[in-house]
Image (tube, rainbow, N blue to C red):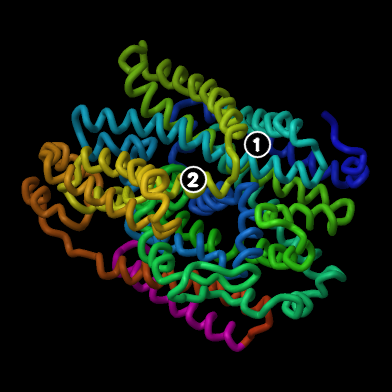
Amino acid sequence: MGFSLLAISSLNYLDYAFIAAFFLTIVLVAIKYSSRAGESLGEFFLSGRKLPWYIAGFSMVATTFAADTPLVVTELVNKNGIAGNWLWWNMLIGGMLTVFFFAKYWRRANITTDVEFVEIRYSGKPAAFLRGFKAVYMGIFMNSIIMGWINVALASILHVFFDIPTHQLIYYVAGAMIFTAIYSSMSGLWGVAINDFIQFSIAMTGVIVLAIVVVNSDKIGGVTGLKAKLPAESLQFLPNISSGNSSGIVGRLSLSVGTFLAFVGVQWWASWYPGAEPGGGGYVAQRMMSAKDEKNSLWATLFFQFAHYCIRPWPWILVGLSTIVLYPMLGADDKRLGYVMAMRDFLPPGLKGLLLVTFLAAYMSSISSQLNWSSSYFINDLYKRFIRKNETFANEKAAQKHYVLMSRIYTIIIMLVALFAYTQIGTIADVWGFVIECGAGLGLVLILRWYWWRINAWSEIAGTIAPFAGYALSKYYFHWNFPQDPESLFFTVGLTTIAWVTATMLTKPEKLEVLQSFYQRIQPQGGWKNVRESLGMPERKSTMPFLVLSWLSAIVMTYSALFFIGSVIFGDYRNALVLLTMAVIGFFLMRLGMKKAELA
């Protein structure tokens, strides 16, 4: 069960020093925050709602920088050039919607999890059922799948980098998970967030170093050599929109009109996806709710969107492009492994340890957040709500100590479940497709529940269940003559929309007192006139136009900054100047909108 002699000899004392220092730092942070995390659920899951925007923002970015992310980007770039990244770049539109329309509301809600939101917005048995169902579905099923695919990526890295036999990988993955589960269960969100900050800094340093080393190697010859060795269309930033089907290998992404509309016109608002939930949710909502105040919540989420889409991708993309030249022999299913092969083949001793720590940091930041997030659902929304309620304890302090203890125990249990999920996952791409399709159409309910009083618990129940029926019909019943991903999204979204609208219209609205309580707590804009009037509250001036201005301007700013960096890297300085100008204009228009909307 040991590493190969070749792998051991490729590391030197400096490599081991990097690795040892990394683990020691993680442990020290966990020890420092362990007593604080043990005080209450608010401290364990929300850092006492005292996170400054930059720590909360870095934590969001670090969580989405998993071990699989550079590998997936490498695969996209190999198949469809730089434009292949539009398969995830399109989600910026929904991410920025969360920044300006929902971040302040999540902080204002003063709840522990986004699932708890169900019982401040809805009422009765349907709301209780929905909360319990989502606690199990999100906290156990979905989180174990997510952690499973992250473990698949780590196993791929270890297999290629250290030549570990496939049947032995489970032991190394289990070791990494056990270490992560121990420190995350000790330190709660405070330790997770501080370690996220450290881990992201290490991870970005590592991927930048790798990009510099690989691109400037003799086999690539710098950016000039890379451009000369690749087809020009593979370096284009925008996809080609055509009337045909999606195609292209080592060339620009070519999308049919239907596929383009699915990505840019539908997916970002219609599909639930971890880290890109319409209206916010999951660990993103957890960080927003953990921020010091509403402004820190907004700035944390804005930083996350900018860093996630603009700052992080280019080192991955450059290495991904280089692997097209370096490893042309890789099959379609192995393209992503080119990234790890580049690490193995081009890094000198000393830097190998840094890159190994980079992937460990990326892995642990994601897994620790998933463990803490999953535990928050199970304890707050299932155990505390239905199994062992507050009133069964002698006092509040005893209750909080018990709940924190159970949170730590559950963290270890869900780790074991995630390890089992890892053994059952075939490919990461298949899991991604399943997650997106089975959340298709729910997004509109998650958005409108904040802005329209008529949405009720049955709306969300129907919107949660219907995508599974759509997925089953499109994949197994109509599969022989049905559009493939992502155009099948139209069918699932349409079916889900019909289901939740029908459920809404055929069931009663929520009780007026529940809607009044929600309105007084959140003070939402939109379709709440009748509720506001029932409270005798004066009409407030709508800031919707300015929120829309901020949203659109931030999208322009981020995309322009993303392509400005790319243009500078590839020496297109004229285009870079235009893009920089657009980014600056977008920034000032965004700030103007924020001031007018009283967000700044």
Type of the residue with mark 1: Val
- Residue 527 shown in magenta: no
Question: As rendered, which of 56 and 378 lies closer to the eye?
Answer: 378
Residue 507 position (above or below residue 323): above
Please name the residue that numbered disc 1 is placed on: 29
Please provide percent x and percent y for residue 581: 51, 83
> Which residue is depicted at the point 40% across and 72% down?
553
- Can residue 104 be spotted in the picture? no
Please provide percent x and percent y for residue 314: 64, 66
The answer to whether 513 appears left or right of 57 in the picture is left
Please provide percent x and percent y for residue 505: 12, 46
Type of the residue with mark 2: Leu
Q: Quadrant of residue 113?
A: top left
- Can residue 434 be spotted in the picture? yes
Please provide percent x and percent y for residue 192: 57, 39
Q: Residues within 10 Å of mark 1 (few under 14, many from 20)?
A: some
**In terms of secondary structure, what is the magenta stretch mainly?**
helix
State the quadrant of the C terminus.
Answer: bottom left
Please name the residue that numbered disc 2 is placed on: 51
> Which residue is depicted at the point 41% across and 56% down?
298
Question: As rendered, which of 133 and 480 lies closer to the eye?
Answer: 480
State the quadrant of the N terminus.
Answer: top right
Q: Residues within 10 Å of mark 2 (few under 14, many from 20)?
A: many
- Residue 589 shown in magenta: yes
The reply to whether dot 1 and dot 2 touch (C-beta < 8 Å) is no
Looking at this rendering, what residue extends furthest in the bottom direction? 574
Please report the bounds of the magenta region as a residue range: 574-600
Label 2: element kind: loop
